[in-house]
Image (cartoon, coloured by chain):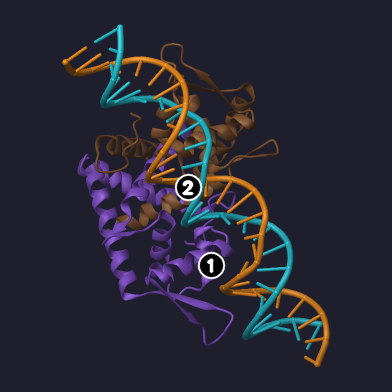
Chain colours: A brown, B purple, C cyan, D orange
Amino acid sequence: MENLRELFQIMTRRFGFLNKYCCISGGREISLIQSHILYEIERQHKPSMQQVSEALGTDITTFSRQIQTLMKMNLVKKTPDPEDRRVHILSLTPEGKEVAATIDQQMNAYLDEIFSHMNEFEKETVIRSIKLLNEAMAKTDKCCTTPLG
Amino acid sequence: MENLRELFQIMTRRFGFLNKYCCISGGREISLIQSHILYEIERQHKPSMQQVSEALGTDITTFSRQIQTLMKMNLVKKTPDPEDRRVHILSLTPEGKEVAATIDQQMNAYLDEIFSHMNEFEKETVIRSIKLLNEAMAKTDKCCTTPLG
DNA sequence: ACATAATACTTGCATTTTGCAAATAAAAAG
DNA sequence: CTTTTTATTTGCAAAATGCAAGTATTATGT
């Protein structure tokens, strides 16, 4: 078997490319991290600052400033939690939801493009494998510890 | 079928984590990009600046400075090409090779750890799938265009 | 009850990273 | 032998980073 690491190194790099060029929506430039933030806010149910920053593995101070930027861009809203006023709850503005949807479409289009070079069986196999990988990574705490399922 | 993008978003994020914390070798902190640079220099046969920067998709000016840093760290050597003195050829110093080897070991250890949560059949399926993915991504020019096979 | 600690988040730097524009230097083309 | 093209490096100026310190709010201990 070939070098396992090479396979993964190149795959992750390619997805880096994919992400890098996916993030433009209606004349707005969205950085890779911003796109992940939008994605994660929508994905979680009314998350706090800390929940999102932890999910993404970014320093909370850097994250705080990234949220400030996204608020200036009118994509994200920050609401104090009535139950615990230390906590600030994040949500997408209607504009933010639009941007997130556009990025989602673009990403899915890229993925469709990639899968168009496979037959249906290969495609199913690959998708099942990615699921297996995600599950396996979730099980280990020696690396890749994102707190999401 | 679930959302295709979600699967990939989380996978790539997890590998981002993996890379971020993998890169310490003998008291030296190696950033994610630096690790990719070391990897790519070793992978290609006596590459030029441009070849590596292009493979990694980083701006050549940023790349130039990253190489300067790696040279100060005594991990990378830059030699003018005798055939074309505009070109500078990159190689790893013995120290750089050590660091690259250490990172390689760590990455493979992580991957082994991940695969330890699968049976042999699942492992083989996943590895075959990653190969399929890389091949499919290589075939498309709408995204993820890394100039490596 | 009230001082002390813990938590969630924000700001102050000081450093690093980024990328466009412009500079340099060498080869290729006309 | 001038003009273009190619490979790489610097000059900024803007953005991102992270530690330490600050603010505000809740939890804990006596």
**Crowding at mark 2 (Cα within 10 Å: few <14, some 14-19, many 20+):** many
From the top left corner, tell me how far across and down residue A54 is, in percent: 38, 33
Report, in whole angstroms, how far the alpha carbon at label 1 lies from the one at label 2.
23 Å
**What kind of residue is marked 2?**
Phe
Q: Is residue A121 visible?
A: no
Closer to the camera, C25 or A109? C25
Q: Are marks 1 and 2 in contact (CB under 8 Å)?
A: no
Q: Residue at x 42, y 60 (%)?
A: B34
Q: State whether residue B68 is above or below residue B81.
A: above
Question: Which chain letter goes with mark 2?
Answer: A
From the top left corner, tell me how far across and down residue A149 is, in percent: 33, 29
Q: Residue at x 63, y 31 (%)?
A: A72
The residue that label 2 is drawn on is: A15
From the top left corner, tell me how far across and down residue A45 is, in percent: 44, 19
**What kind of residue is marked 1?**
Ser
From the top left corner, tell me how far across and down residue A62 is, in percent: 48, 39
Location of residue B36 (image quadrant): bottom left
Closer to the camera, B43 or B98? B98
Closer to the camera, A82 or A44? A82
Provide the secondary structure element on which disc 2 rests.
Answer: helix
Q: Which mark is residue B64?
A: 1
Question: Which chain letter goes with mark 1?
Answer: B
Q: Is residue A15 visible?
A: yes
* In this rendering, position of residue D4 left or right of residue D28: right
Q: Residue at x 32, y 40 (%)?
A: A133
Quadrant the N terminus of chain A occupies:
bottom left
Closer to the camera, A128 or B20? B20
